Structures are given as structure tokens and as C-alpha cells.
Amino acid sequence: MERATIVRVREGLHARPATCFVKLAKSFQSDVEIVKGANRVNAKSSVKLMLASVLEADPVVVRTSGADEAEALEALVRFLEDPESGIEAGGAATPAAPAATRTDASADKDDGRTEDGGLRGIAASEGKVVGPVFGYFPPSIDSAERMLAEGEIDDEIALLSRSVAVIRRRMVDSLSAPELSPVHRGIIAALAEIVADDAVIEEMATEVRKGRDAVTAVREVIGKTAAAFAAVDDPYIAARADDVTAVGRQLCLELLGRKDIVLEDIPAGSILVAEDIGAFDLARAPLDRIGGIACAQGGATSHIAIIGRSHGIPTVLGLRGGIEALRGATEIALDGTHGVAYDVLDDDLRARFAAAVAKAAAEKKALAVYRSIVPKRADGTVIEVAANIGSLEEIDAARAAGAMGVGLFRSELLFMLQTGLPSEEMQYQTYVTLARAFAPHPVIVRTLDVGGDKPLAGIQFPEEANPFLGWRGIRMCLDRPDIFKPQLRALLRAAVGGNIEVMLPMVSDLGEVRRTRALIEDCAAELTAEGVPFERFAVGVMIETPAAVMIARELAKEVSFFSIGTNDLTQYIMAADRLNSSVAGLNDVTNIAVMNAIEMTARAGVEAGIMVGMCGEAAGRVDLIPRFIAMGLTELSMSPASIPRAKKCIVDLTTAT
Ligand code: PEP
Ligand code: MG
């Protein structure tokens, strides 16, 4: 039997809707196929179904054949025709972003070590720690292809089936862990779905029947499947290529009888030393037991930096070759604030670290009283001290620190830890949860700021000679309304609560603001037509390019607020890459050139009567806050840990005048 229909499932059969559809198809005995154009796929395979890229508004034919074909056809068509089918309930979250820089390079010696013998890396999450090394260097899969003799094939098939069963069970066990966060659960569920796909496993078995060893068969099928995902012109689906590869690796290791290094085995207080860590491994990590993180790879927005910061784990990344020395040590020290790792510990260093840890604890205690204080300028104007966060998991820490709302929600982090791009619904749930948590204070969501040095799975980025000057932030979003519009729609829907504001990253031209406004209006018209409730939100811009500073007066006429992004503004004003240790001396926010740019921006905003805030790292610097307040800034947004200190600074300023 067959029936033609138009897919109405919102955003099509990707991710969860695809899984739900497959589950429904599998509940019937009949064979089920979906035909889209010339493509006909087995609808009981979520991998095949996702590869068919069935999108909202696509015409398809559903075919069923078997004992219960009529009921199956009815139920499946009903599913496809319901916009709400398989839509996620409940938000998800991701951890916070660091502003990672290589600092103090001028103090380094010729061998790349600091004066006091440390290894220079990137400061990714503040704090100091000393602890034993837990090396995390997962084995590579280097087995050579082997042709099987006729008599070996059955045994090899049995080995493949056993290994698949082990991995399936492992995924199910991981999913039942109660402490798993929604994001991590999503990652594991995505992997579990692939390994549970009989059609893919059957392809592997077919390769084995041709005489190829199981590891080669798995690598072959996984390679082809991952490439097929990567080639799909839908970013939600293309991003699944990474999941497929991760599953292949697990299977190969099991077939080879090799044990992966398991982060669950990390003893409490140990420092994780690794080349790099992937999302799946992080998903299983007992973060409360990790004392510190040191990695060869990684930068400001790598998963590790994000997790480290949101969980208060001192983290040093980008240690490159230095990781070998740390790997060989038994006990190391990390200074996440300055981005230095020490493989040789003497009494002096131990004493310094112990004193710093004690001082930080004492300071934290003394500052607790400032949490509930509303700091004001001498003229009575409230100075909003808000939090920079990137996930729902940081809400409690931000509130406990006394955050007066969120001055920067780095929404790209939602996109980065997902296994695919987050759906409109998932974003909506996240923004609503945030808005409610901080009401009546504002929650400023920054629209997707990826590209250049921080690419995203599922989006094809061009090779760029100068990624920091390339296709990033608002530039990329305006070129990709398919990605931008779901975010704007989610924000419009979440704004019904009244305290959502939106800011645009990397703005360098008025046209970017105007085009975004036009897109917002398109989204508003769509939501009106669909009868979905929404409200318009205040739109602001980040001031983080020299061009934005130069047109601040014009911008101020078109937006509701400015938020100065000193991390990028410094690198662009000084033409000094924020990740390049060789020019770290120039990458200095206190340079008169940068301070002048901040002052120009503040003046333009104050004259136009709009709010001027700051969300770059400099906002939390107590040595600079008095100058920013004097310039007219009325909002400072920073990592939650800095909030009490900043409030005290403002209070002291007022009482001193
Ligand atoms: C900035 O550039 O100052 C900023 C806050 O944005 P990010 O660090 O995320 O680039
Ligand atoms: Mg920036």
C-alpha cells in the first residue's frame, strides 16, 4: 500500500523526529519505505532516513507492505502530517565560554618555559590546583586489513554481532546514569541510535561475508556513512557525521579487544592530561572528580574550555608539545588564571599554590556579603552587574554570585555541544528557562557567533587565510537564514516573558543591523500566520570591531543598547591575534588605543540615550571598572565568579566619592 503526502513535521525528519518516526515504523510488522523523489529508503533505519533528508514541506510517498500495512500506513502518514511530531520537550544546555589568551609571553624564556619553569598554554578556566596526573590518550585504531579464509567468516560475523551487542549495552547503561546532563544525554542517545541501526550493522556484515575482517568492514561502512552525512545539504543532518565516526571507533576498539581509556576511572582530585577530548568522552566524565584539565589542543571555545569554566575546573589548553612533559610527570600544578602548567614541583611552588588557593577561598568568603547588593553610581544610577554564561547549568552559580541578569548568553555554545544544530524548539525552551530564572532582570542573548577560528559541525566553512577577518558572527548568520531564522523565531517566542533582549556579534556595518531587523520581521510574520505567540525584543549590538566604534553614533540611532566586547575589540584595534602568544604584549585592553575606542563608544551611546554595557573580559577587572563607570557604562557582564568582586569595587567607588 502507499500514500503520497506532504511532510508537516516542523523542521523535518532530523534528529528526534526521525528517531520517533523510526520507532513508530518499527512498532509494525510490515516493511516500511519512504520515497522522496528518486530516493527510496527503509524507514526502519534512522540512519537511512536521516540521509534521505526529508524536510518540512517535502512531498513524499509512504509505502507499507505486510500483515498490518493499513494501520502502519495510517499511523505513519498521521505522524508526517503533524507539525509537532517528535518535537523535543525540555531545553538543553551547554557550558560557558572562556576568553582564552596566551598571556605574559614576554616573561617566557627561549625554551618556551616561563621564568619559573612553567609550560605556557592558554588560560581557559581560572584557578590554581596541584594534583596527580590522569593521562587520557585513547589508543588509535591501526589494524591492517586482512582477507578472511572461507571458514573464518562465520566466526567473524559472530564477533561483529557480539561487539555490537556490547556497545549497545554500554550506551544503554550510560543513558541510565542519573547524573547525566540533558546535553550529554542527547549526545549519547544520538550515538546509541546509530549503533542500534540494523541496516548499518547489516552492511558491515555484508562486507565481512565478502571476506573482509570485521574491523575493516566497520571502518569501510562507517567511513561511507559518515561521508554521506557530511554531504547532506542540511546542517542538522550533516553534523551527525561526527557521531557516526565516534560509534565506529567504539566498535573497532571492541573488535580489537582494546580497552578505551575510561574517564570514569579518574581518581578524585586528579588533573586530566590529554591531547584533546571529544564530546562523547566528556559526556561520560565525572566532572566533580576532575581537579584540573591540561590539553595540547584547544582554544577559547573548545569543549574542554567551556566545560572547565562552567564547572570551575582550572584549565590550561593549547600546551602543544608541552603536554608530553606533563604526561610523563606523576604530579603537576596548573595555573588556569595565567595559562601555565608545571611538571616539576618544588617546595616554593607548592607553597605559592597553597597560598593562592587559600587566598582565593578567603576572598570568596569575604565577598559573599556583596551578592545581594545593588551597586549604584554616585548619582544613584544602578550599575547592572550581570553574568556571562553559555548554558542553563550555570544559572545557579550566576544567581548565587549575585548576577543582576545575564549580559551575555553565548548562544553558540548551545550549538557547539549539540550533536547537531539545536532545533527552534530546543532553543526556545532554553531561552525561556533562562528568562524565567533571572526575571525581572534582562537576559541578553547573543545570536550565533561562530565561524573563522570556531567552526561548527554541520556548517560548511570556507578555507580562510584570515579566519578572524572572515565569515563569522552576524556575517555568517545573514548568509544562512536557514540557521539564523530558527534562532530568531525561538527568541521572539521566548520574549513573551518580557525580559529577553538580543545582541548581534561582530557587527561592522549598519546594513547588518537592518538586514537582521528585516529577518526578525519575516519571522514575526511567519509566527503570526502560524498563530504562535511572540513578542518583539530590544535589539543591541556588540561593539567589537573598529568599524562599529567608528559608526557608533549611527548605530546608536538604530539599536537599543551597546555591549562592548573587549576581547575582540582589543585584537582588532591592536591588530594582535588574541590567541597568538607572540603578540600577547600588544593584545592589551589597557592600551590607550583600546581605551580610546571604548570611550568613543560610550560617548556615542550616552549621547544617544541608550544603555552602554561591556561583556568582554575587561568588564570584570577591578583596576578598570572605575574608568568604565566614569565613561558612562551602566552594565558590566562577566563570569559569575567575578561578580562579587566587581560589585564591591563599585560600592567602594561610590562610598569614596
Ligand atoms: C568579546 O569579544 O569581548 C566577547 C565578549 O565575545 P567572545 O569573547 O565570545 O568573542
Ligand atoms: Mg567577540
Image (spheres, rainbow, N blue to C red):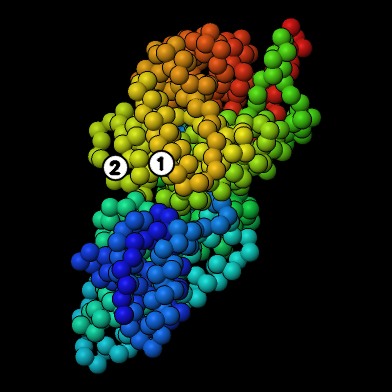
Cβ of mark 1 under 8 Å from ligand 1: the answer is: no
Judging depth in this view, the residue of 230 and 319 nearest the camera is: 230
Q: Secondary structure at mark 2?
A: loop
Horizontally, residue 236 falls left or right of residue 465, namely right
Query: Which residue type does callout 1 highlight?
Result: Lys
Image quadrant in which the N terminus is located: bottom left
Quarter containing the C terminus: top right
- Say which of 239 and 140 sits in front: 239
> Looking at the image, is 92 positioned above or below residue 185?
above
Q: Count how many numbered circles sit on residues in the image.
A: 2
Expressed as whole percent of the image width and height from the top left, the position of residue 28 reads 43, 81
Kindly identify the amino acid type of the residue bearing the numbered disc 2. Phe
Number of other residues with Cα within 10 Å of mark 2, as a class: few under 14, some 14 to 19, many 20 or more: some
In the rendered image, the vertical position of residue 160 relative to residue 474, given as above or below: below
In the shown orientation, is residue 311 left or right of residue 588?
right
Element carrying mark 1: helix
Residue 324 % position (x, y): 42, 49
Among the two numbered marks 2 and 1 on one chain, the one whose residue lies closer to the N terminus: 2
* Residue at x 59% of width, y 39% of height: 496
Q: Nearer the viewer, mark 2 or mark 1?
A: 1
Tell me, for residue 607, which label it has, or none. none
Q: Is residue 456 above or below residue 103?
A: below
Residue 221 visible within the image:
no
Q: Residue at x 61, y 42 (%)?
A: 434
In this figure, which residue is indicated by the disc labeled 1?
485
Taking the spot 35% from the left edge, 44% from the top edge, the residue there is: 482
Residue at the disc numbered 2: 461
